[in-house]
């Protein structure tokens, strides 16, 4: 018994002497791994003009379908464009689309879902409209919007965010219906606190934790959605390098230069994996019930 207590004390002492960052990494390895992977992709995307010696849109017919070399790290595509440069610049489009879709859908979802949760007659109208939007497949709605409008990154963001908004609204509404029945909300009403102050001080802060986790998964889904649209030719314009465009250009020459599809596909998979790991890690970190079990 004394030996067990002594070993336990020694273990606690060793953990107390460890740096805080190391303790955090040991407790949340998935979150740290996802943050590291995402940080690498963000670094490559930001510094792509300095890391790549070749212009991503410059064509060179003489150097078409070249294998990996010192001049072209990932080789070239059917038009002689450098795949390494296009892949790194394509990360900018995917990251921008993913983050903007997550922020836009979360912002609209908070406003609409909170209003619907506190107003019964608005709830009846809004939720039927959201049910109708959810009945339409997201990919079809996005393709239809891209077909009717001019192709651009901004249009892609809006087209992908629209199918995600009803899901966020339903989540926020369900949370608001639970929160508004809590004793502290009823006490605030009894004290004469106005509704806008109750929403700002008590309701919205309690929505942030589940919304942060939900936004991370929306970000990953938006990146894949953007690749779908660009691969089908209904996403970003052809002159804008994105992972979906690169893979669409390489599908006709995949037997001659498999790297045209391989490298952007690997970057897309690693980025989506990193965002999903961050979402899982944030869920474990922010959920108090899971924290107690740990």
Image (cartoon, rainbow, N blue to C red):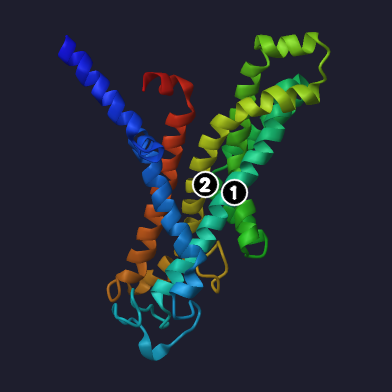
**Is label 2 in contact with label 1 (beta carbons under 8 Å)?**
yes
* The one of 232 and 41 positioned closer to us in this rendering: 41
Placement of 193 over or under 113, stated as above or below: above
Q: Residue furthest bottom?
A: 62
Q: Secondary structure at mark 1?
A: helix
Placement of 139 over or under 3, stated as above or below: below
Q: Is residue 208 visible?
A: yes
Q: Identify residue for label 2.
A: 219
Which quadrant of the structure image shows residue 8? top left
Taking the spot 49% from the left edge, 41% from the top edge, the residue there is 217
Which quadrant of the structure image shows residue 79? bottom left
Q: Secondary structure at mark 2?
A: helix
* Label 2, label 1: how far apart the Cα atoms are: 7 Å
Where residue 160 appears, as percent x and y from the top left, is 58, 50
* The one of 149 and 205 positioned closer to us in this rendering: 205
Which quadrant of the structure image shows residue 44? bottom left
Q: Tell me the quadrant of the picture where the C terminus can be found.
A: top left
Where residue 197 appears, as percent x and y from the top left, is 78, 24
Taking the spot 64% from the left edge, 58% from the top edge, the residue there is 155
Instruction: Locate residue 287 relative to residue 294 in the image: left or right.
Output: right
Instruction: Locate residue 253 relative to residue 249 in the image: left or right.
Output: left
Instruction: Locate residue 44 relative to residue 120 in the image: left or right.
Output: left
Taking the spot 31% from the left edge, 82% from the top edge, the residue there is 66
Q: Few, some or many C-alpha atoms within 10 Å of disc 2 (few <14, some 14-19, many ≥20)? A: many
Q: Tell me the quadrant of the picture where the N terminus can be found.
A: top left
* The one of 17 and 222 positioned closer to us in this rendering: 17
Where residue 219 appears, as percent x and y from the top left, is 52, 47
Placement of 120 over or under 53, stated as above or below: above
Where residue 227 appears, as percent x and y from the top left, is 47, 58
Q: Identify residue for label 1.
A: 101
Q: Earlier in the sequence, mark 2 or mark 1?
A: 1
């Amino acid at each position: 018994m004394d030996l067990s207590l002594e070993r336990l004390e020694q273990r606690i002492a060793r953990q107390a002497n460890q740096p805080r960052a190391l303790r955090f990494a040991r407790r949340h390895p998935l979150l740290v791994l996802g943050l590291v992977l995402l940080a690498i992709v963000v670094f490559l995307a930001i510094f792509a003009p300095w890391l790549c010696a070749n212009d991503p849109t410059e064509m060179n017919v003489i150097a078409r379908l070249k294998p990996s070399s010192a001049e072209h790290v990932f080789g070239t595509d059917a038009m002689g464009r450098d795949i390494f440069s296009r892949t790194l610049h394509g990360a900018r489009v995917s990251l921008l689309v993913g983050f903007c879709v997550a922020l836009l859908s979360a912002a609209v979802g908070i406003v609409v879902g909170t209003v619907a949760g506190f107003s019964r007659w608005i709830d009846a109208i809004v939720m039927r409209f959201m049910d109708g939007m959810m009945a339409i497949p997201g990919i079809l709605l996005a393709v239809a919007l891209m077909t009717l409008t001019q192709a651009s990154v901004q249009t892609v963001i809006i087209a992908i965010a629209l199918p995600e908004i009803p899901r966020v609204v339903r989540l926020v509404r369900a949370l608001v219906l639970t929160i508004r029945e809590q004793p502290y909300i009823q006490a605030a009403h009894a004290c004469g606190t106005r509704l806008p102050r109750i929403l700002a001080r008590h309701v919205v802060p309690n929505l942030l934790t589940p919304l942060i986790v939900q936004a991370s998964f929306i970000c990953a889904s938006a990146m894949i959605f953007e690749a779908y649209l660009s691969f089908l030719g209904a996403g970003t314009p052809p002159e804008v390098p994105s992972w979906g465009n690169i893979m669409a250009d390489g599908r006709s020459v995949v037997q001659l230069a498999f790297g045209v599809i391989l490298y952007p596909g690997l970057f897309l998979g690693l980025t989506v994996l990193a965002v999903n790991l961050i979402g899982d890690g944030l869920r474990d970190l922010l959920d108090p019930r899971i924290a107690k079990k740990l």
